[in-house]
Amino acid sequence: MRIFMTIGAVLALGALGVASPLTFAQAPSGKVPPAKGQKKMPVAAPAVEESDEATKEFEKFRAQMEDSNPAELFEMKGEELWKTKRGPKNVSLAESCDLGQGVGVVKGAYVATPRYFADADAVMDAERRIVWCMVEKQGFKFDDIAKSPFHRENDPGAPDITSLVTYVAAHSKDMKFAVPLDDPRVRNAWETGREITMYRAGPYDFSCNTCHGGEGKRIRMQSLPNISTNKGAIKGAQGWPGYRMTGGVMLTLQWRMNDCFRQQRFPAPKYASEVVSDLLTYMIGNANGQTYRGPGIKR
Ligand code: HEC
């Protein structure tokens, strides 16, 4: 049964245009799916990114763009939002919101989340925590924030929450990810996150790992990082929040998780919910020790 489902998923992925080094090696046309008798994927994939021209070109372009990264505009907006008294309670986040480093402290907060917050009795990623502060400290209504939490194409501006996350993330630039996995509550969230990445369901019987659990997988030229490894997890976490050139939108990791639920043909997770924090605890926790380079650019 399991083997059958695996083959089914591989075939379904083939239909979607996912290619692994294996399928390329066997079928240079990229059209022939792997033989049914195929039991194992290759153990060590070749260094796919390094050898891939499209990726190299994009990396070059990104390096040039990062000198004048549009993310900085959102960061500036976020700073203003962070410091201004707002909401029904007319308080600023700077004077009320503790992201884990002390009230108002943004330095180093992004790379040290998700973490456990006693006042909320929950493990929260940075975005979920900021939403929590906006609701609890400033008096905004969660449903109002959750109505349209992500930057949509053709919207002139990003939602406030996106700018706030970008501002906070920028203050962890060049710092190492340090999700406190020795906290049992955080470890618990990590375990749940790991289980979610393995959970297969939906019309194609996909899990996160169907697309992200192996080396060298790609869809439409996007390489899909293996988020269960340290090297892959940092690729998943790096560059977010990011300015997406396709559509000209600023997007956060909450959006990325949400969109991958869609890719997986799962129902959309509730915005800023526990399941997303658990997934981010798993992925960012796996990236611990790696250096975060700040808000970035995505294609
Ligand atoms: C059907 C395949 C598929 C599934 C299933 C899937 N993803 Fe993705 N994922 C993608 C694709 C394709 C991209 C790149 C999209 C783009 O850049 O346009 C991506 C991108 C990502 C990224 C960003 C990578 C980067 O380089 O910035 C992360 C992180 C991620 N996915 C995590 C997940 C998680 C967690 C799950 C399970 C909830 C999941 N994905 C399920 C296809 C999938």
Image (cartoon, grey):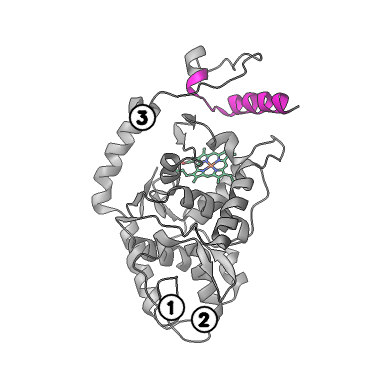
Residues marked 1 and 2 touching at CB (< 8 Å): yes
Q: Quadrant of residue 149?
A: bottom right
**Residue drawn 39% across and 80% down?**
84
Indicate whether residue 21 is drawn in magenta: yes
The image quadrant that residue 71 belongs to is bottom left
Name the residue tied to disc 2. Answer: 137
Q: Which residue is mark 1?
A: 93
Q: Are marks 3 and 1 in contact (CB under 8 Å)?
A: no
- Measuring 40% from the left and 76% from the top, which residue is drawn there? 102
Q: Residues within 10 Å of mark 2 (few under 14, many from 20)?
A: many
The picture places residue 5, in percent across and down from the top left corner, at: 71, 28
The amino acid beneath tag 3 is Ala
Q: CA distance from mark 3 to mark 1?
A: 42 Å
Q: Is residue 19 left or right of residue 295?
A: right
Mark 3 or mark 1, whichever is nearer to me: 1
Sequence-earlier tag: 1 or 2: 1
Report x, y in % for residue 296.
Answer: 35, 51
- Mark carried by residue 54: 3
